[in-house]
Amino acid sequence: MREVPDEIIFLVEESQDGGYKARALGYSIFTQGETFDEIKKNIKDAVHCHFEEKDKPLLIRLHFVKDEIITV
């Protein structure tokens, strides 16, 4: 019997084309959205599509990464 994860972690980054892109760590789940609210909704939808109801994680953790370049 497979163990149900307590949480799933998504790495969320700003897309070069605008908006956001997200990928789950340890799972083949990818999504994108134009706004912060849209990316959160799309992540929830992607998790619901990827897992059976009995195997769904209890929590979704979003880890935001922002690259910034500073000139010297």
Image (spheres, grey):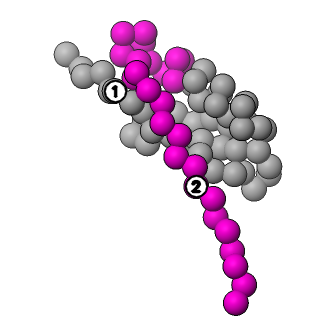
Residue 68 x/y as whole percent: 67, 68
Q: Is residue 21 left or right of residue 34?
A: left
The quarter of the rendered structure image containing the N terminus is top left
Residue at figure coordinates x 60%, y 21% from the top left: 45
Q: Amino acid at mark 2?
A: Val
Query: Local crowd at mark 2 within 10 Å, few (<14), some, or many (≥20)?
Result: few
Q: Earlier in the sequence, mark 1 or mark 2?
A: 1
Residue that numbered label 2 is attached to: 65
Q: Amino acid at mark 1?
A: Asp
Label 2: state its secondary structure. Answer: strand
x then y, percent, for residue 67:
64, 64
Q: Quadrant of residue 71?
A: bottom right
Instruction: Tell me, for residue 55, which label it has, or none.
Output: none
User: Is mark 1 in CB contact (under 8 Å) with mark 2?
Assistant: no
Task: Give the Cα separation between the discs numbered 1 and 2.
Answer: 22 Å
Q: Is residue 10 above or below residue 41?
A: below
Left or right: residue 46 versus residue 42 is: left
Residue drawn at (44%, 26%) of the image: 59
Q: Secondary structure at mark 1?
A: loop
User: Where residue 28 sits: x, y (%)?
Assistant: 47, 35
Q: Residue at x 63, y 50 (%)?
A: 13
Q: Which residues are magenta?
A: 47-72
Residue named by callout 1: 6
Q: Residue at x 48, y 30 (%)?
A: 60
Q: Residues within 10 Å of mark 1 (few under 14, many from 20)?
A: few
Image quadrant holding the C terminus, namely bottom right
